[in-house]
Image: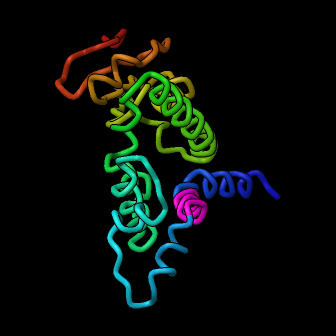
Amino acid sequence: MGSNDHYVYAMQLVTSASFPMVLETVIKLKVLEAIAEAGSDAQLTAHEIVSRLLIPNKDAPDMVDRMLHAIVEGGVAYEKVHGILTFEYSTLDATRKEAFNNAMLNHTTIVMKEILECYNGFNNLESMVDVGGGLGITTNMIVTKHPNIKGINFDLPHVTRSAPFYPGYMAYFDSFGIKVNTILE
């Protein structure tokens, strides 16, 4: 397996994990069995399914409903299961935020190493803006390889407040245009 094959495989693993996890949860909870036991013509609500499974969690009907919609309709399973975007969910507490930021950092590092190895589009740039750039890892990697570029990272205020300081020409702006962390002149 060549290095590009490893990269493609890693990307498939990263981006395809949600659907199998949702499906596995539905199977482990025996949701499909509860539906099947009701008969082929039955049209159960999520509340009826949960009551058959004796799940005490008051949020279970909504979660089961979202999981079944994610399986049937496709789309972003995480959003359908939790009712909010992954990015929003990660802001609910410090542990989730740290796990999400580490996952994004690692994913971005894998992707950007490959891009910077074969893409020459940054060679003649003087400046760049990474809109939705998170903690700035992409901008940092580009500016590190191309020190002539003045990099600007732009994201939501709660994200840019957590962004580390990277040496070089970088500035962080939040969605209100407030310069948060800078040495850009």
Across and down, in percent, residue 135 comes to: 43, 25
Q: Is residue 82 visible?
A: yes
Q: Residue at x 34, y 36 (%)?
A: 132
Q: Is residue 16 visible?
A: no
Q: Is residue 3 left or right of residue 78?
A: right
Q: Quadrant of residue 12?
A: bottom right
Q: Is residue 113 above or below residue 144?
A: below
Q: Is residue 53 above or below residue 56?
A: below
Quarter of the C terminus within the rendering? top left
Q: Is residue 93 left or right of residue 3?
A: left
- Residue 162 is one of the magenta-drawn residues: no
Q: Residue at x 32, y 70 (%)?
A: 45
Looking at this view, is 3 or 10 the one in front? 10
Across and down, in percent, residue 149 comes to: 43, 26
Which is the main secondary structure of the residues drawn in magenta?
helix
- Residue 21 is one of the magenta-drawn residues: yes
Across and down, in percent, residue 118 comes to: 61, 47
Q: Residue at x 39, y 33 (%)?
A: 133
Looking at this view, is 132 or 79 the one in front? 79
Across and down, in percent, residue 43 comes to: 34, 81
Q: Which residue, as the protein is rendered here, is positioned at the far bottom?
A: 41
Q: Which residues are magenta?
A: 19-29
Looking at this view, is 107 or 185 the one in front? 107
Q: Residue at x 82, y 58 (%)?
A: 1
Q: Which residue, as the protein is rendered here, is positioned at the far right?
A: 1
Type of colouring: rainbow
Q: Please state the total of marks drawn on the protein image.
A: 0
